[in-house]
Image: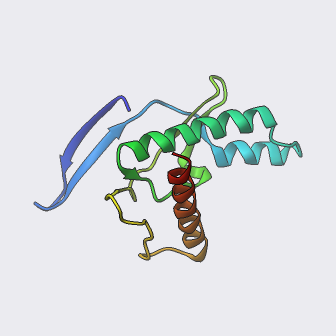
Amino acid sequence: MKYAFITNGDTEDEVYLNVVMDYFPENLYQTIESYTKKRQYFPNNLAKLYAYQMFRGLAYIKGLGICHRDIKPQNILINNSSLTLKICDFGSAKQLQEGIKIFFVERISYFEKVKQILLIFVQDITELLN
């Protein structure tokens, strides 16, 4: 994040947090699609590098007490020239509370539920390993 500022909406209760981030030319979905269109496999070394950066980022925001709740390839920004990855779109993020398992039932599809169940599983495994 480079800069953040708050703006007011049309009504008194509308307040928006605006975040200015680094420019990243594409997201993970677009990167995978480009390899698919060329009928090439996504390189293992890139998959490992991006997975490492993504899990480090997720561990960092978990350490801050934040749950992203919308991890998908479109929300993972990629800069192929510098081989860097950043997580974006924290619009669905929630503050974690100690001792409460995360399972949200609001406006989510079957696949989102599966993703959240996997998140709980990963959290439980992480707690066991720590």
The colour scheme used here is rainbow
Q: Horizontal and vertical percent for residue 27?
A: 60, 43
Give the answer, above or below, for where 42 lies relative to 9. Answer: above
Side of 109 relative to 105 (left or right): right
Q: Horizontal and vertical percent for residue 67?
A: 42, 54
- The residue located at (76%, 43%) in the rendering is 34
Q: Horizontal and vertical percent for residue 87?
A: 50, 42
Furthest residue in direction left, as rendered: 12
- The residue located at (66%, 24%) in the rendering is 81
Side of 50 relative to 55 (left or right): right
Number of marks: 0
Furthest residue in direction right, as rendered: 39
Among the 4 quarters of the image, the one containing residue 100:
bottom left
41 and 61: which one is in front? 61
- The residue located at (54%, 37%) in the rendering is 56
Quadrant containing the N terminus in the rendered view: top left
Furthest residue in direction top, as rendered: 82
Give the answer, above or below, for where 104 lies relative to 13. Answer: below
Q: Horizontal and vertical percent for residue 5?
A: 23, 38
Can residue 77 be seen from the camera position used here? no
Give the answer, above or below, for where 57 lies relative to 15. Answer: above
- The residue located at (19%, 55%) in the rendering is 9
Can residue 48 be seen from the camera position used here? yes
